[in-house]
Amino acid sequence: MNLPEINTSLFKRLRFILVETSRPGNIGGVARAMKTMGFSDLVLVNPRFPDALTDAEAVAFASGAQDILSGARIVGSIAEALEGCNYAAAVSARLREFSPPVTAPRAIAAQLAAGEELHAAVIFGNERFGLPNEIVEQCNVLINIPANPEYSSLNLSQAAQVVAYECRVAALGDGQAASPVGFHGDAASLAQVDGMYAHLEQALVAIDFLDADNPKKLMPRLKRLFSRTGLETEEVNILRGIARHILAVAKKAP
């Protein structure tokens, strides 16, 4: 009997919950923030306007993330929103005297990414009033974004973007693929680089820039300089071409 494969990716285990959101644009903005970071599970608790997921402003602010809105659910209580979750994190700029442990987005993201048994929710409150104490007190942790203490006000979708970004980075770890944009050449071999140094040294001697009888530290310093660049084969060939041209010119000189 083949058991169904369980997807333990954080992208499938993390839910975003918005409580009593006042502006439809913010719902669309959160959907966009989620999609750009690879998340899709969105639940709304009692949004303060009808047709929250189809409102024109929400759709406009989603800017291509309408599929997140289409797949979102609207529920009547935080208990319904948390069904299927075994871990909850409240997001708030306001610290409370009685609250769960306070953590930063990066720390909680690492914890959630590592805990494959965690089916977590991050909960965001109303734009004006934030989250009520009774919801915060139900959560395992309170996420506080370390913003400028003199002006720590973040828009709802901005806060969601910060949390989603940190969770994406933690989920990918060191496995993020290199960008396909731009030219990526083959790294030059040690033999190719050594040949380039020898060729370059001949050229520098030919134009009297390097005194072969008293070289001092010029070549070691040049080697140190080039060692920081991660030379590619094409770059070595370019430098050898320059050295070849210098030698040809020097040979023709009277």
Image (cartoon, rainbow, N blue to C red):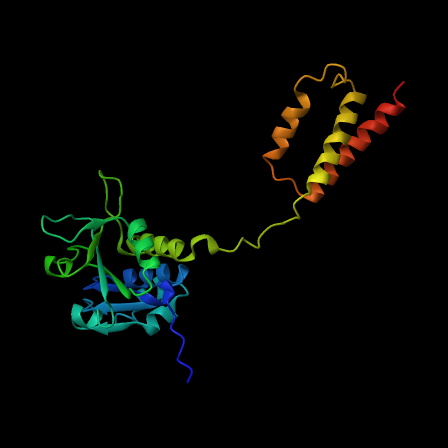
Q: Where is residue 5 in the image (x, y as percent from the top left)?
A: 41, 75
The answer to whether 212 is drawn above or below residue 73 in the figure is above
85 left or right of 227 in image: left
Q: Looking at the rendering, which quadrant does residue 21 occupy?
A: bottom left
65 left or right of 107 in image: right
Q: Report the label total.
A: 0
Q: Name the residue located 39 percent from the left edge and 80 percent from the top edge.
A: 3
Q: Position of residue 183 (x, y in %)?
A: 63, 49
Looking at the image, can residue 16 be seen?
no
The answer to whether 251 is drawn above or below residue 232 in the figure is above
219 left or right of 228 in image: right
The answer to whether 139 is drawn above or below residue 201 in the figure is below
Q: Where is residue 112 in the image (x, y as percent from the top left)?
A: 31, 58
Q: In which quarter of the image is the C terminus?
A: top right
Looking at the image, can residue 134 be seen?
yes
Q: Which of 30 and 102 is in front in this view?
A: 102
Q: Name the residue located 85 percent from the left edge and 29 percent from the top edge.
A: 248
Q: Which of 227 and 71 is in front in this view?
A: 227
Residue found at the very far top of the displayed protein:
214
Q: Position of residue 186 (x, y in %)?
A: 66, 48
Residue found at the very far bottom of the displayed protein:
1
Q: Name the residue located 65 percent from the left edge and 40 percent from the top edge.
A: 231
Q: In which quarter of the image is the N terminus?
A: bottom left
